[in-house]
Amino acid sequence: MPDKYQIVKKDVLTPDISRISVYAPLIAKKAKAGQFIILRATEDGERIPLTVSSCEGDEVTVIYQKVGDSTMTLDELDVGECLADFVGPLGMPTDIDGCDNVAVIGGGLGCAIALPVAAALHKKGVHVDLIGGFRTKDIVILEKEMSEASDNLYICTDDGSYGFSGFVTGKLQELLDSGTKYDRVYAIGPLPMMKFVCKLTATADIPTIVSMNPIMIDGTGMCGCCRVTVDGQVKFACVDGPDFDGHKVDFDETIARAATYKEFEAMRRENHKCRLEGMGNG
Amino acid sequence: MANMSLEKTKMNEQLPDVRNKNYSEVALGYTPEQASNEAARCLNCKNPACVSGCPVNVPIPRFIKKIQEGDMQGAYDELSSANALPAICGRVCPQENQCEGKCVRGIKGEPVGIGRLERFVADWALENNVTSTNVAPSNGKKVAIIGSGPAGLTCAGELAKKGYSVTIFEAFHVAGGVLSYGIPEFRLPKAIVQKEVDNLKKLGVDIELNMVIGKILSIDELFEMGYEAVFIGTGAGLPNFMKIPGESLVGVFSANEYLTRINLMKAYKENNPTPVYKSKKVAVLGGGNVAMDAARCAKRQGAEVHIVYRRSEAELPARAEEVHHAKEEGIIFDLLCNPIMIEGDDQGKVKSMKLIRMELGEPDASGRRRPVPIEGSEFEMDVDTVIVAIGTSPNPLIRSTTPGLDTNKWGCITTAEDGSTSREGVFAGGDASTGAATVILAMGAGKTAAKSIDEYLQNK
């Protein structure tokens, strides 16, 4: 039997994105699509919130992107090593009831979160069109898994190197123009992407659920760091969300809040790279 | 021979201008000579009022007498017979409203420094690895404690001593609750908290970290797992905001967030990965202990810090010593002021705050004079950071997942005087049932609940 919080599987999906499965039987039994975990890679590390990608047996799978110091530290751990902490499931599960025909839209790493939502809907018999957006062909992830979790998969690349040429909003517009009817849209990805999907679906009058991923510490409602204004009300993404009615989220405020520690994070990221390079040279 | 000095024996402290730049403990504790000198101020009253002022009824004159006699083991035995976390209480209890507030020496002059003597004895025990080993043989009954703050730790310790098999479930990656995430290092060193937690482990208490009860397991599932009673000591962790415009601007933080980053996530240490917002001028809203803690942390981060409180100095709810220390460290008190709105720049960052001056009117329900706005007295204050420290509410995670558990309109778990709730076998205490209060009141509730759980399981 693996140890508590042991990494039992690890795949490199792109040079920046990896997938790990962690031994956490209780969480594996409870977690539902849309919920997240918080992990600390090492003692004295940051608490990193990551949405659960899938659960199988005693293992919980999460996908992360090496965007900063803490995720780079996480990436240094290999199969067989243990995380310092792994807590969950946190947040409310995604509402997958009451719809028959949906578009699930993922942007970049957001596809890792869109995937379990699409899979849960698809399993229920809901007709799922999955639109996955990436900058370019080389960083397309989870294509096979997304294809299995949907009726139609549309990959889009910003530079046109693969699939539909353009943003996910372009593809969604095209589908709507061609007469496709959705009773709900799920949008998960970078804040600007979700903002523009919501603009489009508001015009088309399609209810839209977005999954927010603000800065967070405890994940249990205790710090209020993750507050999001929804319909003029302050909500905590960690306990009230992470899903909200996308037409009511104040995206501009959320985008400003996401940049709170931008300088600090950039400094840490550079320091981390220097440490790695320093080690390589030594 | 009693020491009839009207003043408490002074305790050494770091100088204000030195300590407001570091996170080492402010108060350095008594030396044995100082402790002996202060112990001699106790008159050993026949009817000790101090004991009745203590929520856990520490036999105060008895432990002080042992100090005078030079019997430290004896002093510790007396102290720890009633108080499971004396090194913590000696540092954070509001003694002026409790034991020391009732001391007869306080009628003329200063009361006996009971808190300082408590700390002296407890620190002696921690340094010398003295623990209370008075544990009953195992009775095989399992009790689950939710939350490892002062209420949970106390309840766990009391039950373990009675022979119960106790498991504490803690949501965070560190035990201690507010003692770990909230109260800063310079007021309560985390090594002290850890030692008190380790002492509980020595009593056989099992602590399961990273377990958010209500999510990973429900209370009903705990019963299915064989726990025969459950104590909820989940505190009041949900931060309240002012509900004024601008509270979601970049640079507005709950005190919980600010303190958690610095304490629990150890951002006070150099080269730590958790960021703290860089501030030049900080306004801390509120006048309680948490506000003082946040203000003093912000000062140590290098900012100019203002406490903004809507009543006057006399109504500040913080411990007298914290207010005193904060002032010494250069915190500016803007009293009788209330924020109306926070204003931001074009990047959504805080740039100023609009306030209104207040005056005190008639006493309100709390007995304190109600602050009333003075019309036309609005003014602007340039700040880049606002820390909201106006109180907290109980977390809904447990009540929303426990059918049949009654709560009041503030979300506090309804308990009888003995700590029992509307659910059989479920007990609660501390901030989770009273709303935000003090460490010692939570400990008192934990102790009461332990007694009730023992009676309940004996008669079951």
Image: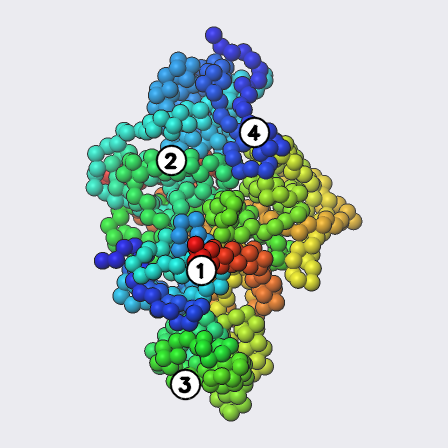
In this view of the protein, can residue A21 be seen by the observer?
yes
Separation of marks 2 and 4 at Cα, in angstroms:
23 Å
Q: Are marks 3 and 4 on the same chain?
A: no
Is A62 located above or below residue A166 in the figure? Answer: above
- Circle 3/circle 4 CB separation < 8 Å: no
**Can you name the residue that lies furthest to the front here?**
A282
Report helix, strand or loop for mark 2. Answer: helix
Q: Are marks 1 and 3 on the same chain?
A: yes
Separation of marks 1 and 4 at Cα, in angstroms:
39 Å
In-front residue for pair B392/A146: A146
Q: Identity of the amino acid at label 4? A: Gln
Residue at (39%, 79%) from the top-left corner?
A143
Q: Are marks 2 and 4 on the same chain?
A: yes
Report helix, strand or loop for mark 4. Answer: loop
Q: Are marks 2 and 3 on the same chain?
A: no
Which residue corresponds to mark 4? Answer: B14
Separation of marks 2 and 1 at Cα, in angstroms:
33 Å
- Circle 2/circle 4 CB separation < 8 Å: no
Output the chain of dot 1.
A
Q: Position of residue A147 (x, y in %)?
A: 38, 81
Which residue corresponds to mark 3? Answer: A152
**Can you name the residue that lies furthest to the right here?**
B376
Between marks 2 and 1 in the image, the one whose residue lies nearer the viewer: 1
Separation of marks 1 and 3 at Cα, in angstroms:
34 Å
Residue at (50%, 66%) from the top-left corner?
A212
Which residue corresponds to mark 2? Answer: B195
Instruction: Assess disc 3: are there few (<14), some (14-19) or many (≥20) residues with their C-alpha within 10 Å of its C-alpha.
Output: some
- Circle 2/circle 3 CB separation < 8 Å: no
